[in-house]
Amino acid sequence: MTPGGQFSQEVRDQVFWREEGACVLCGSGQSPNWQHRKARGSGGTRKVMTAANGLLLCHLCHMAVEASPADARVLGYRVDQYADPAVVPVWRARFGSWALLTVGGLAVFAEWPDEGVVCTEVEARTVAERLTNRAGTARFVP
Ligand SMILES: [Zn+2]
């Protein structure tokens, strides 16, 4: 299965430019993968196909995220089947901040706890560190 194989080229480009071509978790520009925050095949096809549902991860971080659903959920890298990805904040580890991802390909700064962020920055950093350690990409973290 090709990661992100069902995103259109336009959406892939939006996600790529939003993240400046770097993995949202470790900052690496190598082997970009397009992660679906909401699993393909779950409800709301239109929402699944937009930039709000897409994350740019390097191949190694993508594998770690896929293998760690609980951690992925805490950071907003995985969202519930019935959730709208545009209203679930994402921890952008390489910027050290939460953001809401828009359908049109923007990232809007989100502040805990006002916008539904599920944990504090300290907790998010801990979870992100655990994921990059698992992926072996911690050495790339800016
Ligand atoms: Zn990475």
Image (cartoon, grey):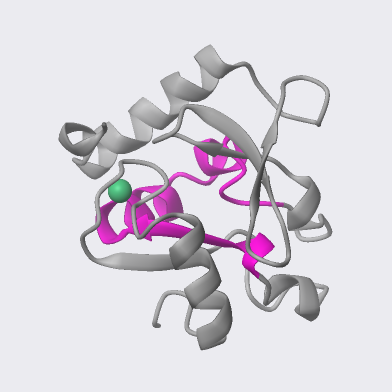
Residue 1 x/y as whole percent: 40, 83
Q: Which residue does the image show at 39% across and 42% down from the upper left? A: 25
Q: Which residue does the image show at 60% across and 51% down from the upper left? A: 78
121 shown above or below 139? above
Image-quadrant location for residue 89 = top right
Farthest residue, direction top: 122
Left or right: 61 with respect to 121? left
Label count reads 0
71 shown above or below 35? above
Is residue 68 located in the magenta-colored stretch of the structure?
yes
Is residue 28 located in the magenta-colored stretch of the structure?
no
Image-quadrant location for residue 99 = top right
Q: Which residue does the image show at 52% across and 65% down from the upper left? A: 15
Q: Is residue 6 visible?
A: no
Secondary structure that dominates the magenta span = helix
Q: Which residues are magenta?
A: 51-79
Residue 134 x/y as whole percent: 27, 38
Left or right: 123 with respect to 138? right
Q: Is residue 71 visible?
A: yes
Q: Which residue does the image show at 83% across and 23% down from the upper left? A: 114
Residue 80 x/y as whole percent: 74, 53
Residue 57 x/y as whole percent: 38, 56
Image-quadrant location for residue 51 = bottom right
Q: Report the quarter where the C terminus lies.
A: top left
